[in-house]
Amino acid sequence: QVQLVESGGGLVRTGGSLRLSCAASGPFTTYSMGWFRQAPGKEREFVAAISKIGDTTDYAVSAKGRFTISRDNDKNTLYLQMNSLKPEDTGVYLCAARPSVKYAGRFIANYNYWGQGTQVTVSS
C-alpha cells in the first residue's frame, strides 16, 4: 500500500509563493507522480505530472510558467513550487501516484493512490 502525505499549504497573498511537498512510502522510483487540485464546488483537476525518473513533465495551462513540479528520489518526496499565485489557485492540492508506469500523465483515472491533500488559499 502506497502512502502519500502532503504538506506546505497555507494562506498567501496574490503574487506570493508556496512550495508543496508530498512524502511517499515504498519504492518511490517506481512511481509516476502527479499533482491535482480541487476547489470548493468544483471537480478535481490536473495541475502537473512527472515521470518516474523526472525526465518528463507536463502542466495544466493554468500552471505553466508559474508552477514547477520536481522530485527527489533519494528523499522519496515530490514537490510543487508555486509562484505568482492567484486567487483562482485556491483549493485542496493532492498528490497522486501510479506505480510501475513510467509516466501516468494528466488523467485522474491513471492514478491508483492519493494523499489527503493540503489546503492552499490565495487572498486577493
Image (tube, rainbow, N blue to C red):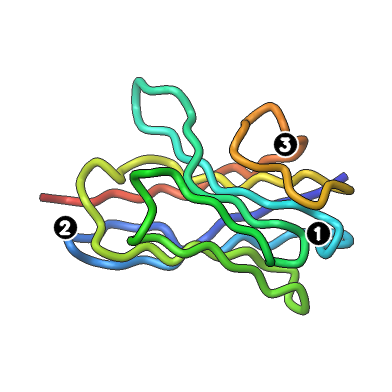
Which residue is found at the position 69% from the left and 27% from the top?
Answer: 109
For the image, the number of numbered tags is 3
Q: Position of residue 35 (x, y in %)?
A: 55, 48
> Which residue is nearer to you in this view: 81 or 93?
81
**On the picture, is 40 further left or further right than 108?**
left
- Residue ranking furthest to the bottom: 74
Q: Give the residue at mark 1.
A: 25
Residue flagged by tag 2: what amino acid is it? Thr
Q: Position of residue 100 (x, y in %)?
A: 89, 48
* 117 vs 81: above or below: above
Which residue is found at the position 68% from the left and 52% from the top?
Answer: 33
Dot 1 crowding, Cα within 10 Å, few <14, some 14–19, many 20+: few
Q: Position of residue 120 (x, y in %)?
A: 36, 50
Q: Position of residue 29 (x, y in %)?
A: 83, 64
Q: Give the residue at mark 2.
A: 14
How far apart are the two marked residues, 2 and 1, measured between alpha carbons? Answer: 33 Å
> Which residue is nearer to you in this view: 19 or 46?
46
Q: Disc 3 on helix, strand or loop?
A: loop
Q: Disc 1 on helix, strand or loop?
A: loop
The part of the image, by quadrant, that contains residue 108 is top right
Q: Give the residue at mark 3.
A: 111
> Which residue is nearer to you in this view: 120 or 100?
100
> Which residue is nearer to you in this view: 68 or 16?
68
How far apart are the two marked residues, 2 and 3, measured between alpha carbons? Answer: 31 Å
Which residue is found at the position 34% from the left and 27% from the top?
Answer: 40
How far apart are the two marked residues, 1 and 3, measured between alpha carbons? Answer: 15 Å
